[in-house]
Image (spheres, rainbow, N blue to C red):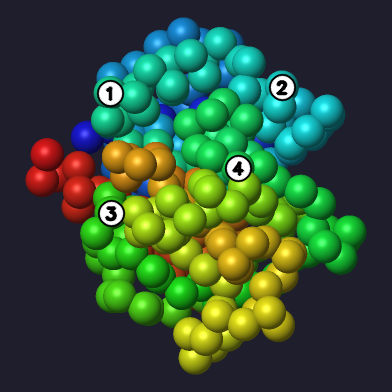
Amino acid sequence: MKFGVVVFPGSNCDHDCYHVLKDALGQDTAYIWHKDRSLDGCDCIVLPGGFSYGDYLRTGAIARFSPIMNEVEGFAKKGGIVIGICNGFQVLLESGLLPGAMRHNDSVKFVCKFVNLKTENIDTPFTNRCNKGQVLRIPIAHGEGNYYVDDNTLKALNKENRIIFRYCDKNGEVTPDANPNGSLENIAGIVNKPGNVLGMMPHPERCSEPVLGFVDGKLIFESIIGWLRKR
C-alpha cells in the first residue's frame, strides 16, 4: 500500500500530509512533483492544501493543468482513491473530478479556526471508521471555501448521499451560525458519484496526533488505510 502526496508550486500542507501518513501512521508515502507523469504505483493520491501557483486566476485553476493531473484524473476514473484537502478540493473542482465551485468566504476574510463537522455518510473509503452523525473537530484555513453548485446538482448530491461532511455546532446541529464561509447547506466535503474521490475544506492532517491537541482527523486517514487493505 502506497500513498502519493502531490506537490504543486505553492503547496504548504504537503509536508503535513506526508508526516501524518509516513511517520504517524507508518505508511509507505512518497512526494509526487506536479511535473511528473507517473503516480509511481500509488494506491491513494493526496492533493494537499496551500496556494498552488499563488492562487492566481481562481484557486486551483492553474494547478488543474499541471502534467500530473492527467495521471490523477485517469487514476480517479479507474476507481483510484483520491483525497483533495482545501486547495486540493479546489483543484478537484477545477479539474471536473468533483462538481461545483468555490467562492470567496461570505465574510470576504481568510478564516483560520477549528470547526465542527457532522459526518453524514460513513459508507465511503474516507469515513468508514466514523459513526453516523459523529461530530469531528477539525481546523479550517481558507479564504475561498464558500462551496457553490447549481440547484439540480445540489439535489443530486443530496439524493445520492454524496455530501460527506457539513459544518455543525458541537451538538451536531447544522445551523447558519456554524457555517464559517457561507457554503451552500453548510457543505464541507463531498464525493464523486462512484465515491472514490473526496474533496474537503477542513484539514484532517492538522489534527491527527495527540501532540496537536485533537486526533479526529486521523479517522479519515485510518478509514482510507482500512479500505485499501480490504481491496
Residue 202 in the image: state x and y as whole percent: 58, 59
* Occupied quadrant, residue 4: top left
What mark, if any, has residue 124 been given in the picture? 3
Mark earlier in primary sequence (4, 2):
2
What mark, if any, has residue 62 been given in the picture? 2
Q: Taking 178 as reference, is 41 left or right?
A: left
* Occupied quadrant, residue 72: top left
Mark 3, other Cα within 10 Å: few <14 / some 14–19 / many ≥20: many
What is the spatial separation of the Cα atoms under label 4 and label 1, in whole angstroms? 21 Å
What is the spatial separation of the Cα atoms under label 3 and label 4, in whole angstroms? 20 Å
Amino acid type for the residue under numbered disc 2: Ile
- Out of 191 and 225, give the one closest to the viewer: 191
Mark earlier in primary sequence (4, 1):
1
- Out of 159 and 87, give the one closest to the viewer: 159
Residue 162 in the image: state x and y as whole percent: 39, 54
Residue drawn at point x = 53 percent, y = 48 percent? 152
What is the spatial separation of the Cα atoms under label 1 and label 2, in whole angstroms? 24 Å
Residue 48 in the image: state x and y as whole percent: 56, 40
Label 1: which residue? 78
Mark earlier in primary sequence (1, 2):
2
